[in-house]
Amino acid sequence: MSDWTAFGRVDADGTVYVKTTEGERVVGSWQAGPPEEGLAHFARRFADKVTEVNLVEARLNSGAADAAHSLASVRRIRAELVEAHVVGDIDGLCARLDKLTSLAEQKAGEARAARDAARAEALARKTGLVEEAEKLAAESTGWKTAGDRLKEILDEWKTVRGVDKKTDGELWKRFAAARDSFTRRRGAHFATLDAQRKQAQGAKESLVVEAETLAESSDWAPTAARLKDLMTEWKAAPRASKEAEQRLWERFRAAQDAFFTRRSEVFSARDAEQRGNLDRKQALLSEAEAIDVDADPRAAQARLREIQGQWHDAGRVPREAAAGLDRRLRSIDDKVRQAMESAWRRTEPSANPLLAQMREQVAEAEQRLNRARTAGDAKRIREAEKALESKRQFLKLAEQTS
């Protein structure tokens, strides 16, 4: 690109030529300015071709591109260069493309070989799955384990691709026959277990009784966990007779539904209350953020204390909203504190009424902490302790500098 005259020229009438080992050929006409600009224009076109080749080469070397597609791209670009309206080292780029053609052909061959190997591997995998299924169908007496494994084999079968349709159909027939054989043999085995169904009925009756006992519990988390365990035990237990199974299941399910319905109602009421608290705190925040701190810092502080008192009385909000609300309120408190400190510094100590006001704030913070401790609200206790410590430190600083 830096020495366009090495690869092209513009004659007196504006015709642009490119130089190759086979001689010069016309690539266009330039009438819009000096010949140097014309050469630069066609050189940029050549640079675009180089960029295209770079991209094909990079994708081919990285393995990101399909080798056959890359080969087609290389051949297309190579053919286009024969009559391309560009100025640049066409011979060098053609040589580079010839090397890329060889590389792409090699990689395309490797890809074909890989596909052939994949097909062989897929055939071997499906054949192995069929043979395992046939062995389970003929020999296994671990009914649940074997049944689960046959399901796993089916799931794995669905993931294997690449076997030709005819061979795949033949293997599938063998697998389906093995599953059917296992199912018949298992059915014959369980046909002999009718005598055990009364025992299974007793076990499930015990599960039903426990579930009905738990249905009225308000110990939500442990009870929910136990009911889920009971469901797991129910599924694992042998089946009773059809009539008894249905009757027991209806009682068992009704007990579970009763508990989880009550729990849902309680949680919904709690969530509704917390959403109402959220609306109240958001309204208080709007009031706090509207306070004109600079106009009257002392009045702003008094109004903020009122809002903070209402804030603590508003109750809990949804967990995901709590941190953001508290952060906004702390920001307002910091702004008021800074304004009060600035006002205090501008006042002579003998005429400064803020020390008394700050002591009152400490006393109020102590009372708020006592109320939180009495209520046993851990979150309010932490917030009150933090607020009290902040006000004490501010008072101490004020007293030291007065």
Image (cartoon, rainbow, N blue to C red):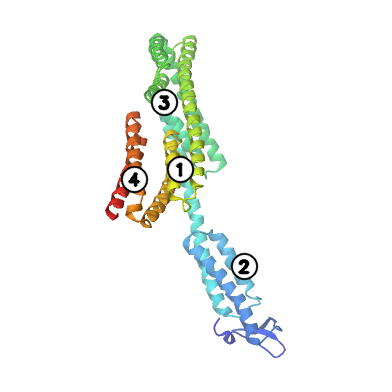
Tell me the distance, in whole angstroms, between the alpha carbons under discs 2 and 1. 78 Å
Mark 4: secondary structure: helix
Q: Amino acid at mark 3?
A: Ala
Mark 1: secondary structure: helix
Residue highlighted by disc 3:
138
Residue 303: image tag: 1
**Residue 264 visible in image:** yes
Tell me the distance, in whole angstroms, between the alpha carbons under discs 4 and 3. 93 Å
Q: Amino acid at mark 1?
A: Arg
Tell me the distance, in whole angstroms, between the alpha carbons under discs 4 and 1. 17 Å
Residue 1: image tag: none
Q: Amino acid at mark 4?
A: Ala
Residue highlighted by disc 4:
356
Instruction: Tell me residue 121's x, y (percent).
Output: 45, 46
Tell me the distance, in whole angstroms, between the alpha carbons under discs 2 and 4. 89 Å
Comes first in the chain, label 3 or label 1: 3
Instruction: Tell me residue 23's x, y (percent).
Output: 63, 85
- Determine whether 343 is above or below 229 in the image: below
- Decide if residue 173 is on the left or right side of residue 87: left
Tell me the distance, in whole angstroms, between the alpha carbons under discs 2 and 3. 59 Å
Comes first in the chain, label 2 or label 4: 2
